[in-house]
Image (tube, helix red, strand yellow):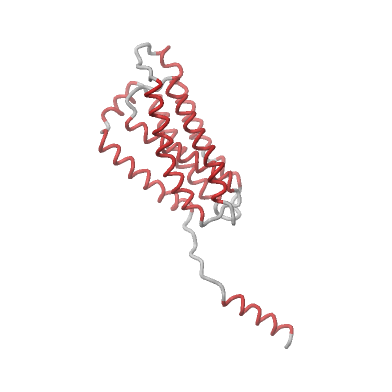
Amino acid sequence: MSELSRHDSLINTLGAELVPVRRLLPPWRRTLGWLLAVFAIAVVLLMLNGVVGMQRRWAGTPDLAWAGVGAIITMISAAWAAFALGVPGRSAAWAWLPLPGLLLWLGASGMGCLRKLIAPATHAASMHEAGDCLFFIIGFSLPLSALLILLLRRAYPVRPVLTAVLIGLASAAASASLLEICHSFDSTATDLLMHAIAVSLVIGVNAAMGGRLLQRQ
């Protein structure tokens, strides 16, 4: 048998075992699919809590509105960046995409630390109330993170830990955005501390566990 025939035979043998692979949707479309799940949760919360309380709070404290906008931008951009990193050949520079929204979110939220000085009549969150915020953010971040990990497992990102950090950031930002719908008091230093702890825990757990789940076997 000639050398060419042996090569053809090997190619035919290997080709016979190949299984067609369904192409992944573009990152923006997969991001949109995840955002639909967040939107569905938001609709339920709005049905339960209404919008009047949120509008009144934002009208009296515009910085909270800007913080909410920053969280939404962070949510969208971090999820998009995570899906983008699941595409072979994409640059790690995608990880910087959430930075503008994150800076807006952190900067506007930081105004809450001065709220008691600016508005002494502000109701300061008790540790119990602030603790409820912590459990809210963590509680909603877990299923949202799990959904993102499930959607990204088919892509097998080559930077699993970095992708998992973005998953945690997107999920925590989404949960913080949802919290604005039913947040019953102005953000103060105590409340913001709990928010920071919750977001850090979500990102840390995703980096530790999500990175392993996204790694190639």
Q: Is residue 53 above or below residue 204?
A: above
Nearest to the observer: residue 203 or residue 71: 203
The residue lying at 37 percent from left, 47 percent from top is 37
What is the x, y in percent for residue 29?
43, 53
**Horizontally, is 7 left or right of 66 in the view?**
right
Q: Quadrant of residue 40?
A: top left
Q: Most extreme residue toward the bottom, as rendered?
A: 1
The residue lying at 31 percent from left, 29 percent from top is 54
Q: Quadrant of the C terminus?
A: bottom right
Nearest to the observer: residue 26 or residue 6: 6
What is the x, y in percent for residue 130?
40, 24
Q: Quadrant of the N terminus?
A: bottom right
The residue lying at 26 percent from left, 29 percent from top is 52
Counting every numbered tag in the picture gives 0
Q: Is residue 66 above or below residue 154?
A: above
**Horizontally, is 83 left or right of 47 in the view?**
right
Q: Quadrant of residue 183?
A: top left
What is the x, y in percent for residue 216?
59, 55
**Horizontally, is 36 left or right of 105 in the view?**
left
What is the x, y in percent for residue 141?
43, 39
